Amino acid sequence: MLPSFFDSVLQLIVRTSTDLPPDVRAAMKHARGAEPENTRAGQALAIIAQNIDLAVDHEGAICQDTGMPTFEIHVPVGANQIWMRQQIREAVAEATRRGKLRPNSVDSITGANSGDNLGPGTPIIHFDQWDRDDIEIKLILKGGGCENTNAQYALPVELPHLGRADRTLDGVRKCILHAVWNAQGKGCSPGAVGVCVGGDRTSGYLHAKEQLFRTLDDVNPDSRLAELEASIMATVNALEIGAMGFGGKVTLIGCKVGALNRLPASFFVSVAYDCWAFRRLGVVLDQSTGAINHWLYRDPSHPIIPMLDQAGFARTGREVVLEAPLSEETIRSLRVGDVVLLSGRMFTGRDAVHSYLMKHDPPVDLRGAMLYHCGPVVVKEGDGWRVTAAGPTTSIREEPYQADIIKRYGVRAVIGKGGMGAKTLAGLKEHGAVYLNAIGGAAQFYARAIKHVDGVSLLEFGTPEAMWHLTVEDFPAIVTMDAHGNSLHKDIEEESGKQLEVIA
Ligand code: SF4
């Protein structure tokens, strides 16, 4: 067999999880240059840049959500795909053991986490034969937050703010604009979209995701689609959704469109949204040894150019310093737009914890507490634990529960990303609590604000879903929903909706 195959795949996984490809780095650098530093978007992009540098310097996961590993493989005729599939699965399990991938494979019926990223449907491995002698493996790690913002349209369709999308390229254009608008900051903007025109419901989504393997700076060989991509990129940033949905000049860093034939009765437009943590790399392997002949998307002989030429998140002196437990008076003094620095005890809780708290008392006292929507990457060290990646997860999933949990247990600050809805906003106002937006994907940055893991509850839910008890210091976040009924997310959605009508 191929003695170096396993090591090559492991290298590919580790590198993909920890080092953004140069085209994405360049786009993010450009985005940063477009936003004034003292704006919310500018501050978010400074933290993102710092996070990208930290990840590659320390070989840590860029984002704690290392996504659904998806391998696209080309092999010569006669290659043993059964053996390769097994080797890839073992490399995925090893990368998970090393903390480079978060255990992300969950039984859909019981919720049990397999712990090693293996299970029915995970990882995704697609093989194709080609008439070359070498082996090409491409990998994309696309997280749940942006996956949840994918969209599929059956044309013709009426779209809010855009009117009717017909079965034309203009109709496709409207669908893409709608998908980006609908995503707001929930998919950790600025993002990139892969789009498929046509196909059926399954092949459409697959082909849309495949578009994300194109580099951001390539030009579509189909001039009609090249024109569509250019027209989206020329207009979409006028929505001013900006980084994290904070408002700003850069909402999208790429748009790649492909087309498949369709049935006469169907006209689907499928949109795969990827976040700024756009992790995609590839390798070409020697057919007799499995050793890496060369990398795709990156050239190891070129040094990695740091994203930052100065310190990252810079304090202005206007930050509000908060120490848990938090009082109602302190919380009611905060307003949308305030930047806060959090210190003291913080508890994590996401889907499983919220569901649990609706039926059971909390395992800890949550009065005055900071509750962080986060599924960290945590490694065991001796008798203790260490968090190696800990950015926020998409908060809107907890919308059905959050207001009740605030009311029942006295939580004062909810930290997450992408914002929450009307029910939570009313709950914040009634009970004196606040929603704080941390910077999505900044897993390395926030891991360094966690000074100690003090304990853990509900570990039976798996490490991402357990309730971790953390001590944090100077953890920055922005008030985006306050205790006075104000929501930055609601305002940006309304304003960008009006803008959508202008560019329709
Ligand atoms: S950057 Fe945001 S959307 Fe992307 S994987 Fe991380 S948390 Fe999910």
Image (tube, rainbow, N blue to C red):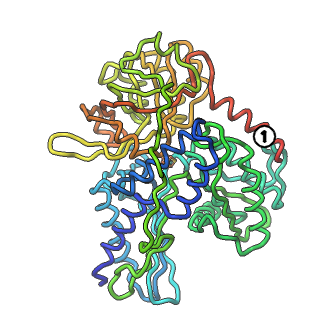
Report whether 246 appears left or right of 126. right
Viewer-proximal residue, 182 or 164? 182
How far from the left and from the top, in percent, is residue 107? 39, 49
Q: Secondary structure at mark 1?
A: helix
Please tell me in which quadrant of the rendered image residue 459 appears: top left
Residue 85 to residue 277: above or below: below
Please tell me in which quadrant of the rendered image residue 91 appears: bottom left
Q: Name which residue lies at 59% across and 40% down.
A: 41
One can see residue 105 in this view: no
One can see residue 226 in this view: yes
How far from the left and from the top, in percent, is residue 136? 46, 78
Q: How crowded is the residue under tag 1: few (<14 C-alpha within 10 Å), some, or many (20+)? A: some
Please tell me in which quadrant of the rendered image residue 274 appears: bottom right
Residue 474 to residue 428: above or below: below
How far from the left and from the top, in percent, is residue 479? 54, 26
Residue 343 to residue 56: above or below: above
Q: Name which residue lies at 68% across and 67% down.
A: 258
The residue lying furthest to the left in this view is: 382
Viewer-proximal residue, 458 or 274? 274
Report whether 309 appears left or right of 179. left
How far from the left and from the top, in percent, is residue 448? 34, 41
Report whether 396 appears left or right of 326. right
What residue sits right under mark 1 in the picture?
Answer: 499
The amino acid type of the residue labelled 1 equals Gln
Q: Name which residue lies at 32% across and 43% down.
A: 462
Q: Name which residue lies at 64% across and 48% down.
A: 34
Residue 232 to residue 41: above or below: below
Label 1, ligand 1: CB separation under 8 Å:
no
Viewer-proximal residue, 190 or 273? 190
Q: Quadrant of the N terminus?
A: bottom left
